[in-house]
Image: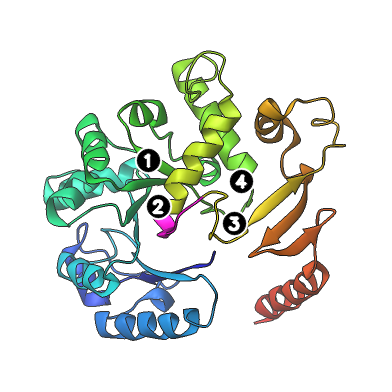
Amino acid sequence: MTFVSCGLCHNAASYFHCFGGQSPGDGQRRFVHAVDGFARLVEDARAVAAMLPDAVVGVAPHSLRAVAPEELGAIVAIAGNAPVHIHIAEQTREVDDCLAWSGTRPVRWLLDHADVDHRWCLVHATHIDDDERDGIVRSGAVAGLCPVTEANLGDGIFPAHAFDAAGGLHGIGSDSNVLIDMTEELRWLEYGQRLTHRRRNVLARGTGESTGQALFNAALRGGAQALGVEGGILPGLSADLIGLDRTHASLCAVPPETALDALIFAAGRPAVDCVWRHGAKVVSQGRHRSGDVARERYRVVIQQIRDM
């Protein structure tokens, strides 16, 4: 399925109200929208998405440091029943700045001032205390984790073990210009918990259970909710499937019940052989049918940007 996220940073005047009066930097000004302009952007996105077979248009007010409280309420109203994604509590500095501004930690502030429910995905939510963790669980919101980015930037480790034990839902996404790879994200998620708790198979569902299967299933469930769709391989759903190369050195002698362990912790993305999107095969023998064209277009665009 296709998810279109319309992001919002508020106008410069509103920055005075958020986290101590920060103004947008030169590199941020191009992302700034007033609420009216943002509403038009969402409507335009919905018109385009209506031509796609299963697209969902959600809204993404960037963060509490970028959107004033009154703007947040207006943006959520524009969303209606669609998904709402927001970056929150990624870094300790963000928590400190929110405390200085409001006297409250960012996730706690959001839970107290917005109607956070199953539509919401709290992206990162790395630095949460027990009260905030339990509040997210009660709200039904999804924690949107980006372990590769959080590791690359040195942001910290999400308390996934405690969150999972409390009944929380999480999805996995990419917030990275370094790497886009589901297996890397899931591997880093588990390895971060192992380093924190100094034991193995932290996110497995029980003794002897497949850790890879648990990681995949949890991300599938939370990710589907965050996108506003139903996930899985079921009648009536979009046929979005992958096929693995069983001749790959890390998979050739592995039984089916541990194939996801081998994929996530050993083989990685190179073991993906085929991909079907909406029932059409778009990847075969590890190569996207439009890959050569896309790579050439990318090189041209990057060169144009460098020459600007």
Foreground: 143 or 152?
143
Task: Look at label 1 and name its amino acid.
Answer: Leu
* Mark 4 or 2, closer to the camera: 2
Query: What range is drawn magenta here?
Result: 226-231
Q: Which residue bears the numbered disc 4?
A: 182
Position in image of residue 120 (x %, y %): 31, 55
Residue 15 is drawn in which quadrant? bottom left
Which residue is at a point 45% across and 52% down the rendered structure image?
Answer: 224
Foreground: 300 or 290?
290
Task: Look at label 2 and name its amino acid.
Answer: Gln
Residue 85 is drawn in which quadrant? bottom left
Q: Are marks 3 and 2 in contact (CB under 8 Å)?
A: no
Q: How far apart in space, not on screen, are marks 4 and 2 (Cα)?
A: 17 Å
Going from N to C along the chain, the mark reached first, 3 or 2, is 3
Q: State the colouring used for the structure image.
A: rainbow
Going from N to C along the chain, the mark reached first, 4 or 1, is 1
Q: Secondary structure at mark 1?
A: strand
Position in image of residue 27 (x %, y %): 45, 71
Foreground: 94 or 174?
174
Q: Are marks 2 and 1 in contact (CB under 8 Å)?
A: yes
Q: How far apart in space, not on screen, are marks 3 and 2 (Cα)?
A: 25 Å
Position in image of residue 115 (x %, y %): 17, 57
Q: Secondary structure at mark 4?
A: helix
Q: Which residue bears the numbered disc 2?
A: 225
